[in-house]
Image: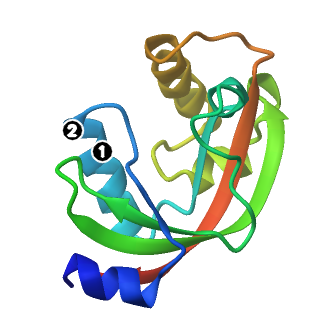
Amino acid sequence: MNPSKIKARYPDAVACKFGDSQHLCDELTALIVSGAKVATCDALSAYELGEEAIPDIGQVYIVETWLNKPVAAIKIVKVDITRFEDVDEAFALAEGENADLAGWRKDHQAYFERNGGFAPDMELVCEYFEVVEIF
């Protein structure tokens, strides 16, 4: 679908990418399209810098590839603020990236260390979403 049709269909949507590299973005985008990934998180401190607002329930995002190609529209259905060390297995599995909580913790600790710092008690914005449309 071309970008102008997407904008017309979702006028208030915000474009977003998942991951911090092309490889990770491709992997996470494929998980969203397949339905395996229905949750995501980021450090609360990233939102406190003012670059992006904490998502509201009902907000629609246009998921893009690393090269800015729209692939899906997702809608936020739940948002929680949770400390890293308190994330449970249900959320970790909803992220769709790991087979268990231990794998989620390992991968996400590495991600946060690459992107501003990590602490076990850091607060995360944990979002659940549903796929509205695949383009």
Query: Is 129 in front, or is 10?
Result: 10
Q: Quadrant of residue 60?
A: bottom right
Tag 1 residue: 25
**Residue at the image point whose x is 81% and y is 16% from the top:** 121
Q: Are marks 1 and 2 in contact (CB under 8 Å)?
A: yes
In the image, residue 55 above or below residue 46: below
Residue 78 appears anywhere in the view: yes
Query: For the residue carrying disc 2, how many other residues have a C-alpha within 10 Å: few (<14), some (14-19), or many (20+)?
Result: some
Locate residue 59, reporting x and y percent: 64, 69
Q: Amino acid at mark 2?
A: Gln
Locate residue 40, reporting x and y percent: 58, 49
Tell me the element at label 2. Answer: helix
Residue 134 appears anywhere in the view: no
Number of marks drawn = 2
Tell me the element at label 1. Answer: helix
**Residue at the image point whose x is 28% and y is 70% from the top:** 71
Q: Is residue 22 left or right of residue 78?
A: left
In the image, residue 91 above or below residue 102: below
Q: Is residue 118 left or right of residue 7?
A: right
Q: Amino acid at mark 1?
A: Cys
Q: How is the image coloured?
A: rainbow
**Residue at the image point whose x is 47% and y is 18% from the top:** 115
**Residue at the image point whose x is 33% and y is 57% from the top:** 29
Tag 2 residue: 22
In the rendered image, which quarter contains the N terminus? Answer: bottom left
Query: Is 117 in front, or is 61?
Result: 61
Query: Is 21 in front, or is 51?
Result: 51
- Can you tell which mark lies on residue 56? none
